[in-house]
Image: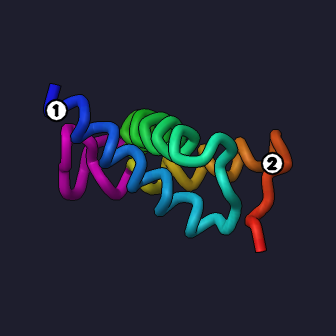
Amino acid sequence: MLHFLWVLIIGAVIGVIGQMIVGRDMPLGWVGNIIGGLAGAWIGSSLFGNWGPMVAGMAIIPAIIGAIIVVFVISLILGSRKKA
């Protein structure tokens, strides 16, 4: 149970980092950040492998790169922009 919470927290942090780099918000707030971070971790590890520091079973650098891709694509599809 604790590992599951740790994965959700790390997923949210990765999602926030991804949206800060892209400069666009994920829809659904924190839930969107968690989903974007976890999807980004999966896509990043699938495309770039598992290299770099590992936290909660996720390679951080490929996960952030994957989150950048996910945030960018989702924000393009849904038209979400950064709130001023």
Q: Tell me the mark number nearer the camera, choosing from 1 and 2.
A: 1
| Depth order, front residue of 50/56 | 56
Q: Secondary structure at mark 1?
A: helix
Residue extending farthest left: 2
User: Which residue lies at the image location 43% right of the left edge and 55% below the top edge?
Assistant: 64
- Is 42 on the left or on the right of 75, as rendered? left
Kind of residue at badge 2? Leu
Q: CA distance from mark 1 to mark 2?
A: 32 Å
Numbered tag placed on residue 3 in the rendering: 1
Above or below residue 2? Residue 16 is: below
Q: Position of residue 50 (x, y in %)?
A: 27, 43
Above or below residue 70? Residue 21 is: below
Q: Quadrant of residue 48?
A: top left
Residue extending farthest top: 1
- Is 81 on the left or on the right of 74, as rendered? right
Kind of residue at badge 1? His
Numbered tag placed on residue 68 in the rendering: none
| Depth order, front residue of 18/13 | 13
Residue highlighted by disc 2: 76
Q: Quadrant of the N terminus?
A: top left
Q: Which residues are magenta?
A: 49-62
Q: Position of residue 44 (x, y in %)?
A: 44, 43
User: Which residue lies at the image location 39% right of the left edge and 48% below the top edge?
Assistant: 63
Q: Position of residue 2 (x, y in %)?
A: 14, 32
Q: Position of residue 11 (x, y in %)?
A: 38, 44
Q: Quadrant of the C terminus?
A: bottom right
Q: Quadrant of residue 19?
A: bottom right
